Image (spheres, rainbow, N blue to C red):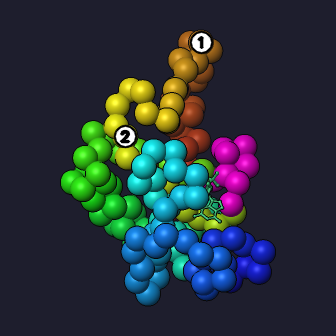
Amino acid sequence: MAIQCVFCKIIEGTIPAHRIYEDLDVIAFLDINQTTPGHALVIPKTHYDHFLNTPKILMNQVMNVAQRIGQAQMQMLHAKGVNILSNALQPAGQSVMHFHVHVIPRFGPHDQLKIEMLHNSQKANMDLPMLVNQLKSGMHEK
Ligand code: 5GP
Ligand code: ZN
Protein backbone atom coordinates (compact mmCIF):
# COMPACT_ATOMS: atom_id res chain seq x y z
CA MET A 1 0.00 0.00 0.00
CA ALA A 2 1.18 3.51 -0.84
CA ILE A 3 0.47 5.81 2.11
CA GLN A 4 -0.59 8.89 0.15
CA CYS A 5 -2.53 7.00 -2.50
CA VAL A 6 -6.24 7.82 -2.58
CA PHE A 7 -7.13 4.45 -4.13
CA CYS A 8 -5.16 2.54 -1.47
CA LYS A 9 -7.23 4.48 1.08
CA ILE A 10 -10.42 3.38 -0.66
CA ILE A 11 -9.18 -0.24 -0.57
CA GLU A 12 -8.47 -0.08 3.17
CA GLY A 13 -11.76 1.74 3.79
CA THR A 14 -10.47 5.04 5.17
CA ILE A 15 -12.04 6.89 2.21
CA PRO A 16 -15.59 5.90 1.28
CA ALA A 17 -16.54 4.81 -2.20
CA HIS A 18 -19.59 3.35 -3.90
CA ARG A 19 -18.28 -0.18 -4.36
CA ILE A 20 -19.61 -2.29 -7.19
CA TYR A 21 -17.41 -5.37 -6.87
CA GLU A 22 -14.73 -6.85 -4.66
CA ASP A 23 -12.70 -10.06 -4.57
CA LEU A 24 -9.32 -11.00 -3.10
CA ASP A 25 -7.31 -9.06 -5.68
CA VAL A 26 -9.58 -6.52 -7.38
CA ILE A 27 -12.15 -3.90 -6.45
CA ALA A 28 -14.40 -1.71 -8.58
CA PHE A 29 -16.29 1.43 -7.56
CA LEU A 30 -17.98 4.45 -9.09
CA ASP A 31 -15.74 7.29 -10.20
CA ILE A 32 -16.35 10.31 -7.98
CA ASN A 33 -16.75 12.33 -11.19
CA GLN A 34 -19.47 10.52 -13.12
CA THR A 35 -18.58 11.38 -16.72
CA THR A 36 -21.68 9.42 -17.69
CA PRO A 37 -23.99 7.64 -15.19
CA GLY A 38 -22.33 4.38 -14.12
CA HIS A 39 -18.73 5.43 -14.89
CA ALA A 40 -16.70 2.85 -12.96
CA LEU A 41 -13.08 2.34 -11.98
CA VAL A 42 -11.51 -1.12 -11.65
CA ILE A 43 -8.27 -1.42 -9.69
CA PRO A 44 -5.98 -4.09 -8.25
CA LYS A 45 -5.78 -4.14 -4.46
CA THR A 46 -1.99 -4.19 -4.66
CA HIS A 47 -0.56 -0.81 -5.57
CA TYR A 48 1.05 -0.54 -8.99
CA ASP A 49 1.53 2.90 -10.53
CA HIS A 50 0.03 2.16 -13.95
CA PHE A 51 -0.68 -0.65 -16.39
CA LEU A 52 2.87 -0.61 -17.77
CA ASN A 53 4.28 -2.08 -14.56
CA THR A 54 1.35 -4.22 -13.41
CA PRO A 55 1.89 -8.01 -13.47
CA LYS A 56 0.16 -9.72 -16.35
CA ILE A 57 -2.02 -11.99 -14.20
CA LEU A 58 -3.36 -9.00 -12.28
CA MET A 59 -3.96 -7.12 -15.55
CA ASN A 60 -6.07 -10.06 -16.70
CA GLN A 61 -8.07 -10.06 -13.47
CA VAL A 62 -8.73 -6.32 -13.73
CA MET A 63 -9.76 -6.59 -17.38
CA ASN A 64 -12.06 -9.52 -16.59
CA VAL A 65 -13.92 -7.38 -14.03
CA ALA A 66 -13.94 -4.41 -16.45
CA GLN A 67 -15.62 -6.60 -19.07
CA ARG A 68 -18.26 -7.79 -16.62
CA ILE A 69 -19.03 -4.23 -15.54
CA GLY A 70 -19.26 -3.16 -19.19
CA GLN A 71 -21.75 -5.97 -19.78
CA ALA A 72 -23.76 -4.81 -16.74
CA GLN A 73 -23.74 -1.23 -18.05
CA MET A 74 -25.21 -2.46 -21.32
CA GLN A 75 -27.76 -4.77 -19.71
CA MET A 76 -28.86 -2.81 -16.66
CA LEU A 77 -28.15 0.85 -17.52
CA HIS A 78 -29.15 0.44 -21.16
CA ALA A 79 -25.86 1.87 -22.40
CA LYS A 80 -25.50 1.92 -26.17
CA GLY A 81 -21.73 1.26 -25.97
CA VAL A 82 -18.79 1.25 -23.55
CA ASN A 83 -15.33 2.81 -23.53
CA ILE A 84 -12.50 1.38 -21.47
CA LEU A 85 -9.53 3.62 -20.81
CA SER A 86 -6.36 3.42 -18.76
CA ASN A 87 -4.12 6.48 -18.59
CA ALA A 88 -0.46 5.72 -17.90
CA LEU A 89 1.64 8.58 -16.57
CA GLN A 90 0.92 12.28 -16.45
CA PRO A 91 1.42 13.14 -20.17
CA ALA A 92 -1.33 10.61 -20.90
CA GLY A 93 -3.65 12.27 -18.40
CA GLN A 94 -3.12 10.04 -15.36
CA SER A 95 -3.94 11.89 -12.14
CA VAL A 96 -4.12 9.02 -9.62
CA MET A 97 -0.94 6.97 -9.71
CA HIS A 98 -2.56 3.63 -8.88
CA PHE A 99 -3.35 1.50 -11.92
CA HIS A 100 -7.01 1.76 -12.85
CA VAL A 101 -9.25 1.05 -15.78
CA HIS A 102 -12.14 3.43 -16.49
CA VAL A 103 -15.28 1.67 -17.69
CA ILE A 104 -17.52 4.36 -19.14
CA PRO A 105 -20.99 3.59 -20.47
CA ARG A 106 -22.00 5.56 -23.57
CA PHE A 107 -25.49 6.78 -24.26
CA GLY A 108 -25.16 8.55 -27.58
CA PRO A 109 -23.33 11.32 -29.42
CA HIS A 110 -24.38 13.96 -26.90
CA ASP A 111 -23.30 12.32 -23.66
CA GLN A 112 -20.50 13.82 -21.58
CA LEU A 113 -17.47 12.03 -23.09
CA LYS A 114 -15.66 13.18 -26.19
CA ILE A 115 -12.79 11.10 -27.57
CA GLU A 116 -11.30 12.46 -30.73
CA MET A 117 -8.33 11.00 -32.60
CA LEU A 118 -7.01 13.60 -35.00
CA HIS A 119 -5.41 12.51 -38.24
CA ASN A 120 -1.69 13.08 -38.10
CA SER A 121 -0.71 15.11 -41.13
CA GLN A 122 2.91 13.99 -40.70
CA LYS A 123 2.05 10.34 -41.41
CA ALA A 124 3.56 10.54 -44.90
CA ASN A 125 6.94 11.27 -43.29
CA MET A 126 6.81 8.35 -40.87
CA ASP A 127 8.92 5.26 -41.44
CA LEU A 128 6.26 2.67 -40.64
CA PRO A 129 8.49 -0.44 -41.09
CA MET A 130 11.05 1.11 -38.72
CA LEU A 131 8.32 1.82 -36.18
CA VAL A 132 7.20 -1.81 -36.42
CA ASN A 133 10.77 -3.04 -35.89
CA GLN A 134 11.28 -0.80 -32.87
CA LEU A 135 8.02 -1.90 -31.27
CA LYS A 136 8.65 -5.59 -32.02
CA SER A 137 12.07 -5.49 -30.43
CA GLY A 138 10.73 -3.65 -27.38
CA MET A 139 8.02 -6.21 -26.60
CA HIS A 140 9.10 -8.45 -23.77
CA GLU A 141 7.43 -11.66 -22.71
CA LYS A 142 6.99 -11.82 -18.95
P1 5GP B 1 -7.03 9.34 -14.16
O1 5GP B 1 -7.12 10.79 -14.54
O2 5GP B 1 -5.86 9.09 -13.25
O3 5GP B 1 -7.10 8.41 -15.32
O4 5GP B 1 -8.37 9.03 -13.36
C1 5GP B 1 -8.48 9.14 -11.99
C2 5GP B 1 -9.96 9.12 -11.68
O5 5GP B 1 -10.11 8.93 -10.30
C3 5GP B 1 -10.67 10.43 -12.05
O6 5GP B 1 -11.68 10.17 -13.01
C4 5GP B 1 -11.25 10.91 -10.72
O7 5GP B 1 -12.55 11.44 -10.85
C5 5GP B 1 -11.24 9.65 -9.87
N1 5GP B 1 -11.06 9.90 -8.44
C6 5GP B 1 -10.12 10.69 -7.87
N2 5GP B 1 -10.26 10.68 -6.53
C7 5GP B 1 -11.30 9.87 -6.26
C8 5GP B 1 -11.92 9.45 -5.03
O8 5GP B 1 -11.55 9.83 -3.92
N3 5GP B 1 -12.97 8.59 -5.15
C9 5GP B 1 -13.42 8.14 -6.35
N4 5GP B 1 -14.45 7.30 -6.33
N5 5GP B 1 -12.85 8.50 -7.52
C10 5GP B 1 -11.81 9.36 -7.47
ZN1 ZN C 1 -2.48 2.89 -4.34
Earlier-in-chain disc, 1 versus 2: 2
Instruction: Quickly name the residue at label 1.
Output: 121
Q: Ligand 1 within 8 A of label 1's CB?
A: no
The stretch in magenta equals 88-96
Give the residue at x 54% y 58%.
Answer: 31
Decide whether residue 89 is among the magenta residues: yes
Q: Residue 60 at x, y = what percent?
A: 40, 68
Instruction: Single out the residue that lies furthest toward the right.
Output: 4
Above or below residue 132? Residue 100 is below
* Residue 60 shows up from this direction: no
Q: Residue at x 42, y 79 (%)?
A: 22
Please give the count of numbered marks on the rendered protein: 2
- Above or below, 52 against 87 in this view is below
Q: CA distance from mark 1 to mark 2?
A: 29 Å
Residue 94 position within the rendered picture, expressed as x and y whole percent measured from the top left: 67, 52
- Residue shown at 49% from the left, 62% from the top: 30
In terms of secondary structure, what is the magenta stretch mainly?
loop
**Mark 2: amino acid:** Arg
Q: Amino acid at mark 1?
A: Ser
- The answer to whether residue 107 is left or right of residue 94 is left
Position of 29 compared to 121: left or right?
A: left
Q: Is residue 19 visible?
A: yes
**Disc nearest the viewer among 1 and 2:** 2
Residue pointed to by mark 2: 106
Give the residue displayed 55% in from the left and 71% down from the top: 17
Quadrant of picture, ligand 1: bottom right
Check disc 2: other Cα within 10 Å, few if <14, some if 14-19, many if 20+. many
Residue 4, image x and y in percent?
78, 75
**Residue at disc 2, secondary structure:** strand
Label 1 residue SS: loop
